[in-house]
Amino acid sequence: MANQYEVGSVHTGKVTGIQPYGAFVALDDETQGLVHISEITHGFVKDVNEHLKVGDEVQVKVLSVEEESGKIALSIKATQEAQAKPQSARKPKPARQVQPKAEEAPSGFNTLKDKLTEWIEQSKREDLIKK
């Protein structure tokens, strides 16, 4: 089984079952794999039944093969090109706000070193000393 289905290969399969988390696809009479809901189509899929029905023939790409368990992960969207979103569907990006540079101190803020020099000068002035 694993030799026949290599990672990256594309095959035609038939949908045999649908679950809330994805769809099972038979690759041949003895082998089936799972197409996870996130691998069904480009974009958001709320309900698998809106995209697939039991009996549908689909192109799938093999994403992974677990040798021990025999599980095969498949993707339908990997066989399709992503459709570009129409310009009107895109949300405009918010304008970036310019942050002040770190070395620019906001007005009203003085470092302790600057204030200390100012306080020493004030302490030497006779007119500010209380008697």
Image (spheres, helix red, strand yellow):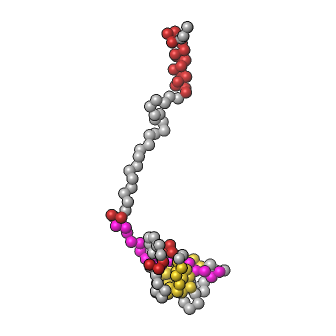
Q: Position of residue 107 (x, y in %)?
A: 44, 31
Residue at (52% x, 86% y) in the render: 16
The residue positioned farthest toward the right in the image shown = 68
* Quadrant that contains the N terminus: bottom right
In the image, residue 107 lies in the stretch drawn in magenta: no
In the foreground, 116 or 94: 94
Residue at (62% x, 82% y) in the render: 70
10 on left or right of 68: left
**Position of 63 relative to 86 (above/below):** below
Residue at (43% x, 77% y) in the render: 80
Residue 65 picture quarter: bottom right
The residue positioned farthest toward the top in the image shown = 131
Task: Residue 74: tell me if it is visible.
Answer: no
Q: Position of residue 69 (x, y in %)?
A: 65, 80
- The magenta segment is 69-86
By secondary structure, the bulk of the magenta-drawn segment is best described as loop
84 on left or right of 12: left
In the foreground, 8 or 35: 35
* Quadrant that contains the C terminus: top right
The residue positioned farthest toward the left in the image shown = 88
